Image: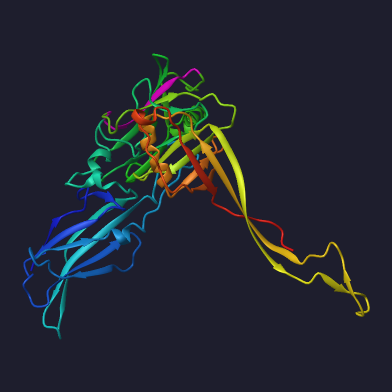
Amino acid sequence: MAITIQSYPIGGQNVTMAHNPIEYVVSSTNKTQTNFKYIADLYWLGATEPVRFTMGVEPTYGNCRFDFSSILRNLVTSDPPTFINDFQPCTNSYQTLTVKFGEQYGASSALTNYLNLATHTMKVWNASLSVSDWWNNNNPVTAYAIKNDQRKFLTNVPRGDEFNGVKVCYNDLHYLYLLQDGTSNDIGYVEILLYKGASLHSIVTWDCATTKTTPVLRVGVGAKNLQEASTYQNELNITSTFGFPFMDTEITRYSVQVIDVGAKPLTEVMWFKIECECTWESPYRLCFLNKLGGYDFFNFNWNSKKTSSYKKTDYERKMWEWNNTGTAILYNSKSRGKTQYSTIITDKLQLTSGWLTEDESTWLEELIASPDVYIINNTTGQLTAVTVTDSQYDYKTLEYDQLFNLTVNLEFAYTRFSQSL
């Protein structure tokens, strides 16, 4: 008897996306046996017993297709950033999958299971890619799993170029997430090149320390993160060719890249441009889970509006009272007939961005679709959970819309209660 794994999930044999099909195709030399069925026992980290799938033979080829995404997508969550700047493991963002294939056949009165005839183990991470990103045998992992200077961080933010990179204000927190597929790439450090205008100011490196084997990692690379890192270099294993502090208000741009222990690039170069939009309001910086399983960041600087909505519940009560002897009925102007006994308050926020590029408009659809959105406090790193209530997104183009921005409607993910009578 023999079970053969004919094909593996999208992404290859090491890592795949939790919210896309996680499909195996298997075959058996015993597929013509009486009452034959394929068996798949699915295990994951921490599971004491497997989930068992049994499926019959596909009539044309005699093979079988198993898709485990319905279970595994519920076993990964996410890792919003905390105010820690060096490499941090994102242990909630992935899960280890082990599947053991077997078969079942025999007389109806004496079916026999033959288990664990072929086994495979891989990682799934909290990504949900568009169909166009993975169909026709396109392997998205080759775009993101760190290996060379063509591999991307887990974000679709428009990259720009050396002089017009991702915009951050001097006081902005920002984090980059990256994916490892379990191959032999050995992270050494993140390299940051700081510029004052056209001149290189300092080359900064952060050692990866002990987190280098985690499939999903994050590192703090915002201008505010770098200010903090300038102060705590001993804790973060930082070196700087300029010395410390290496970050000041004259820095105009910088680049970020992950390097292996042999000084070979493992990721793209991500450029950042320090630019604070002039506004009379205090900006709101949103942090949101993107479709690649990382978190993106964006500032809303204009025309913020706070409102509150109220859900009130009341009942009718008598408006009169007995007198002291119970011989007469008294009415008083302060007595209530209609009495409010419950008021639930929902706080809301409407935010408006500055002018957007067409690429930024396309990218920010991920904010509207995101199930996990926060307002991030750049001073403390505190996250305040909010929900995007918009149910439609209009893509904008320069050809038809010329100048455009984005207005987003939020509800705070808590409710308040007034006093009860």
Q: Position of residue 303 (x, y in %)?
A: 56, 34
Q: Is residue 16 visible?
A: yes
User: In the rendered view, does 170 fall on the left or right side of 145?
Assistant: right
Say above or below: 232 vs 340.
above
Quarter the C terminus occupies = bottom right
User: In the rendered view, does 2 fall on the left or right side of 353?
Assistant: left
User: In the rendered view, does 170 fall on the left or right side of 134?
Assistant: right
Coloring applied to the structure: rainbow
Say above or below: 402 vs 117.
above
Residue that appears at 25% across and 59% down: 98
- In magenta, the rendered stretch is 250-263
Residue that appears at 50% across and 30% down: 224
Residue 258 within the segment the image draws in magenta: yes
Q: From the viewer's side, name the closer residue of 331 and 50.
A: 331
Q: Position of residue 194 (x, y in %)?
A: 41, 21
Q: Can residue 158 be seen in this view?
A: no
Residue that appears at 42% across and 42% down: 367
Q: From the viewer's side, name the closer residue of 225 and 345.
A: 345
